[in-house]
Amino acid sequence: MARLSLLPIETWPPELKAAVGGSAPSEIELGVTRITAHRPVLSVAMMQYNQVLRSNRTLPERLMELVRLRIAFHNQCRSCMAIRYASAVEDGLDEGAVCSLQKPFEAPDLSEAERSAIDYGERLATNHLSIDEAVYDRLRTFFNEAQIVELGLWAAWCVGLGRLAATWDMVEDLPEAFQDRSQQRIGPWQGEPVVVNRGASSERLDTVGKG
């Protein structure tokens, strides 16, 4: 059971329901919003920030999903590891690439740009002070400075929220492999994933609180 209560969507205030739309998303798609719903205003603000991060990307969806999943592994956030965003799947992310995240710096099917971005996200998740000038110099061989900022903000979001979500221990709606407590440490490549959409659209979020 999750360590904080999961609020069903029927109990949410209108502004939070509006942020996720009028359809009936799956429990997995609602994700941490079922807990952040305890503070609806903050929950909507989180969704707005996440949507801005996603809808203004210049970096490939596949690359950003690989970074997210490698960070999720270090965070041991099972709810993060169990999902794949549809936009990344449409951009070429397959389970072969996800399996490569076991040893990303040896994997032949990851590009040098992807490995550089994964290394950056991994360092941010495990030893942020190891990110020195040499790391940034390597990033500059693949990305411009605006893209490095974009990558950093995405990785920081994944590290922070993923660690928080891991402590909330929301596993009851996940595929069985991600619920299995016999394995203390697992990876995103160890179970059948669930493909989800991005969640609230920018159009819906733009109207929240505007009457």
Image (cartoon, rainbow, N blue to C red):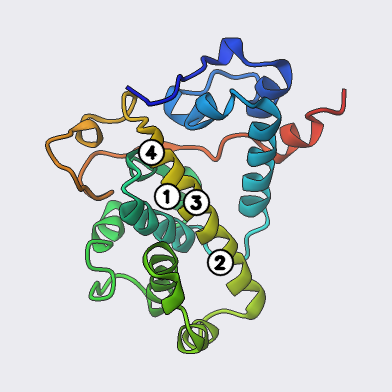
Q: CB under 8 Å between callouts 4 and 2? A: no
Q: Quadrant of residue 47?
A: top right
Element type where label 1 sits in the image: helix
**15 lies left or right of 77:** right
- Sequence-first tag of 3 and 1: 1
Element type where label 3 sits in the image: helix
Judged by depth in the image, the label closer to the viewer, 1 or 4, is 4
- Where is mark 4, residue-wise? 167
Q: Nearer the viewer, residue 47 or 38?
A: 38
Q: Please report the residue visible at 67 percent of the width from the left and 34 percent of the height from the top.
A: 42
Question: Is 109 located above or below residue 83 in the figure?
Answer: below
- Sequence-first tag of 3 and 2: 2
- Where is mark 1, residue-wise? 89
Report the Cα–Cα distance between label 3 and label 1. 24 Å
Q: CB under 8 Å between callouts 3 and 2? A: no
Q: Amino acid at mark 1?
A: Val
- What is the x, y in percent for residue 189? 24, 50
Q: Nearer the viewer, residue 153 or 111?
A: 153
- Where is mark 3, residue-wise? 160
**131 lies left or right of 44:** left
- Where is mark 2, residue-wise? 152
